[in-house]
Image (cartoon, rainbow, N blue to C red):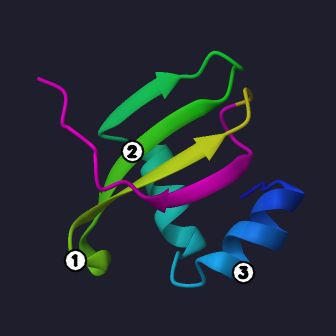
Amino acid sequence: MKTTRYFREQVVRKRPYIKTEWCERILAEPIARAVQADGRIRVWGRVPEFGGRVLRVVTLADGETVHNAFPDRDFKAPA
């Protein structure tokens, strides 16, 4: 999995409980996806090992390089 320097140096340090396997799985099978104004892509997925919580993974515009990942408490499933 490709990651940005920000992800490796900041996100992993601040949120060591986030597993790269979770990010890979969410990118492969998202429950929702949206493109931001800056071209980055938001992808959401549920993580059973994390109490079923939703994790938001943000990639660069290429859709592959992970830039950020965090629990998204405000996620609303698409209707």
Q: Is residue 21 above or below residue 42?
A: below
Q: N-terminal of the two: label 1 or label 2?
A: 2
Q: Which residue is mark 1?
A: 51
* Picture disc at residue 30: none
Along the line of sight, the residue nearer the viewer: 59 or 71: 71
Q: N-terminal of the two: label 2 or label 3?
A: 3
The residue shown at (56%, 58%) is: 69
Q: Is residue 19 above or below residue 34?
A: below
What's the amino acid at mark 2? Trp
The picture places residue 53, in percent across and down from the top left corner, at 26, 65
Question: Magenta residues: mostly which secondary structure?
Answer: loop
The magenta-colored residue range is 63-79
* Picture disc at residue 13: 3
* Real-space Cα separation, disc 1 to disc 2, in angstroms: 15 Å
Q: Which residue is mark 2?
A: 44
What's the amino acid at mark 3? Arg
The residue shown at (37%, 54%) is: 72
The residue shown at (82%, 59%) is: 6
